[in-house]
Amino acid sequence: MKKKILIIGAGPGGLTSGMLLAHRGYDVTILEKASVIGGRNAPIQAGDYTFDTGPTFLHQKFTLDEVFAECGKTAEDYMEFIKLDPMTTLTWGEISMATSFNHETMMANIEKAFPGESKNYARFMADHAIKLKTVFPCLQSDYNSLKSYLKPHMLKALPYVATKKSVMDVLSEYFTDERLKLAFTFQAKYLGMSPWNCPALFSILAYIEYAHGIYHVQGGLSNISMGMAKSFQEDGGKIMLNSEVTNIQYSDNGKRAATVTLENGETMECDDLIVNADYAHARSTIFNEKNKAPESLKKKKFSCSTYMLYLGLDTIYKEEPHHHVIFADDYHQNLRDIQDEKVISKDMSIYVRNSSVTDPTVAPEGHSQIYILVPTINTRNCAPWDEDPEAYRNIILDKIIEKTGMKDLKDHIVEERCITPQGWESNNIFMGATFNLAHTMDQMLYLRPRNRLNGFDNIYLVGGGTHPGSGLPTIYESARISANLICETYGDKHERVDLASDILTEATR
């Protein structure tokens, strides 16, 4: 008889585990509280405009390719990818620079904006090709035991992992211009952290982008979730929407999840349970008598939040880039404000995605949609976001108008949606911390909530709140780790499809 697996949450992690386990012959049902799949990777529909809720591009595509390959499929059969070049325009005051995965183009762009720094870029890329190849296996292993630290690949990576340096410390070893350093730090936003506090390990994030590129998915990144759901269902997986889990019941003296109860009162049995809900929210609400108190969870370090604007426009700004990052005038102070979790900075950094210049499917003909993300404080100290939301919105839009060619932006808005940190929190994201638990050294690897949840025999975690962390590729990897752990408990070991090794080895040559 097939083992019955229940998955709470149809976000990227839940869908990935579901794909792998359904393809391997397990009886898998995904329970999703919302009316649409995807979680933070779901679409938002505003009139005739389609937006991504969260992630807006894919890096480290080879990890997604590996997941589909393990199911005997290719991702391109389910979605259309466009590799972007230029990738992102970065603006510091009056200086702007476009980034590229093409080494010669990137060298030329750096030399034009920051004379003399291109040779430092070449050195950074060469060193980080080796660094990524060395640490990458550490992101693919589970850390359910301290013995994991004794694995050969972990011992090789220790010089990169066991250091007190920050990402900014690492970049200071390569670049002299403070502005250029920021071109290699904004990727820390995937982790919701300041590069001055983010562990040095994560300097690999910028390298991954500049070496291997980033991808847009036509129709939006939410179509990755749609493609995964289709693959999952083709292999017999079941998805139940509008099915919120309210609590878990146990057997074996509380060590095994036996059933879950839905909001409508229905009870469902399982042999194994995967939790893809926001870690701290779920851990404090649905574990029944084994809930952790919210106060104890708040003692942990959490990522920042984000203020989101989704704008449907009756025009297209064809000369504006697909991705644009506008740095705060005092970027370090902006990040200190966010890290301290008390002050809503008015000198903010702004990320703008103008995907309609690449993708005609997300808005009516002649129209476009603009996605705006502003990193800001989470709700730990109950910042009063609702006191004057219009004023904060206008500061953001005025800065975009000043720093871009969208001078008449406000005149063309016909649809608008907004998510504040409180909005994230009300959607079951603990403290509105969009990127989950912070990725500090004391909350990584064995010290992060483990893929097989500590204290239970058959409850597994996937998503940004477990190892290896937040960001789409690492969430896919967390799901693959947990799926493999489940299979191994039944003596059902599966070889990984490994596309990464050849790609990363080639980059070091």
Image (cartoon, grey):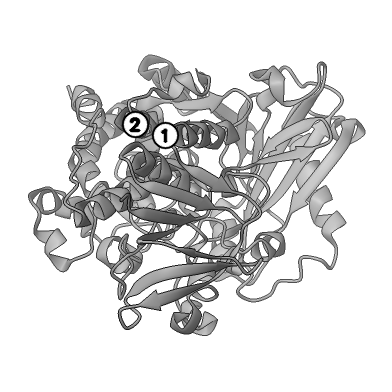
Q: CA distance from mark 1 to mark 2?
A: 9 Å
Q: Which residue is mark 1?
A: 235
Q: Secondary structure at mark 1?
A: loop
Q: Is residue 309 left or right of residue 27?
A: right
| Count of numbered circles in the view | 2
Q: Specify the quadrant of the image occupied by residue 423.
A: bottom right
Q: Position of residue 258 (x, y in %)?
A: 40, 70
SS at circle 2 = loop
Residue 172 seen from this side: no
Kindly indicate whether the residue at mark 2 contacts the one at mark 1 (C-beta within 8 angstroms): yes
Q: Residue at x 24, y 55 (%)?
A: 142
Residue 364 versus residue 164 in the image, above or below: above
Q: Nearer the viewer, residue 408 or 97?
A: 408
* Residue type indicated by callout 1: Asp
Q: At which x and y percent is residue 159?
A: 16, 53
Q: Is residue 349 above or below residue 506?
A: below
The x and y percentages for residue 457 are 28, 69
Q: Which mark is residue 71?
A: 2
Q: Please, which residue is most extreme toward the front here?
A: 1
The percent position of residue 84, horizontal first and vertical second, equals 51, 21
Q: Nearer the viewer, residue 285 or 344?
A: 285
- At horizontal 42% and vertical 21% (from top left) the residue drawn is 106
Q: Is residue 484 visible?
A: yes
Q: Is residue 63 left or right of residue 490?
A: right
Label 2 environment density (alpha carbons within 10 Å; few <14, some 14–19, many ≥20): some
Q: Earlier in the sequence, mark 1 or mark 2?
A: 2
Front position among marks 1 and 2: 1
Q: Quadrant of residue 250?
A: bottom left
Residue type at the position of mark 2: Cys
Quadrant in which the C terminus appears? top left
Q: Is residue 287 above or below residue 228?
A: below
